[in-house]
Image (cartoon, rainbow, N blue to C red):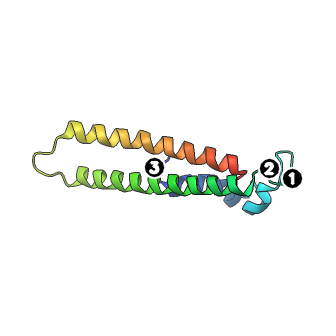
Amino acid sequence: MFDRLGAFEEWLQGGQETGDVPPVSAQELAETSPQGERRESKLSKNKREQLEREVAAVEKRIATVEGEIAVLELSFQNPATGTDWESTHRRYSDLRVLLEHLYEDLARHWELMGH
């Protein structure tokens, strides 16, 4: 789905860049209901902080997986002698699936936080 965290963030902000959606701060978004009415945040401070920690952990994991994918992609361009291509491609495929799941997890966390 997305090949890197930056692509996911660009996708999230895509509506703002094309003018489809007026710019809204994260705070305003968190305080606005789907019907456009302002609402109070329903998350307690502790729950919000917990979700923020979880988001940070998912983002860190995404960066790690993206790094591993980048290394594998470089190895495809400059293969080492005796490379086990079957296991290398399997690892690459597994990492791509994991990355997609991490993006979905990140989106769920952001949704819970009201972003």
Asked whether residue 46 appears in the rendered view, the answer is yes
Viewer-proximal residue among 83 and 112:
112
Query: Helix, strand or loop at disc 2?
Result: loop
Furthest-front residue in view? 46
Query: Helix, strand or loop at disc 1?
Result: loop
Q: CA distance from mark 1 to mark 3?
A: 35 Å
Query: Helix, strand or loop at disc 3?
Result: loop
On the image, the x and y values in percent for residue 34 come to 82, 45
On the image, the x and y values in percent for residue 30 come to 77, 55
Q: CA distance from mark 3 to mark 2?
A: 33 Å
Tag 3–tag 2 contact (CB < 8 Å): no
Residue drawn at the location 85% of the way across and 54% of the way down: 40
Q: CA distance from mark 2 to mark 1?
A: 8 Å
Say the numbered circle drawn on residue 42. 2
Q: Quadrant of residue 71?
A: bottom left
Residue that numbered label 3 is attached to: 3
On the image, the x and y values in percent for residue 63 come to 44, 57
Asked whether residue 24 appears in the rendered view, the answer is no
Viewer-proximal residue among 94 and 77:
94
Does residue 62 appear to the left or right of 33 in the view shown? Answer: left
Residue that numbered label 1 is attached to: 39
On the image, the x and y values in percent for residue 7 come to 52, 54
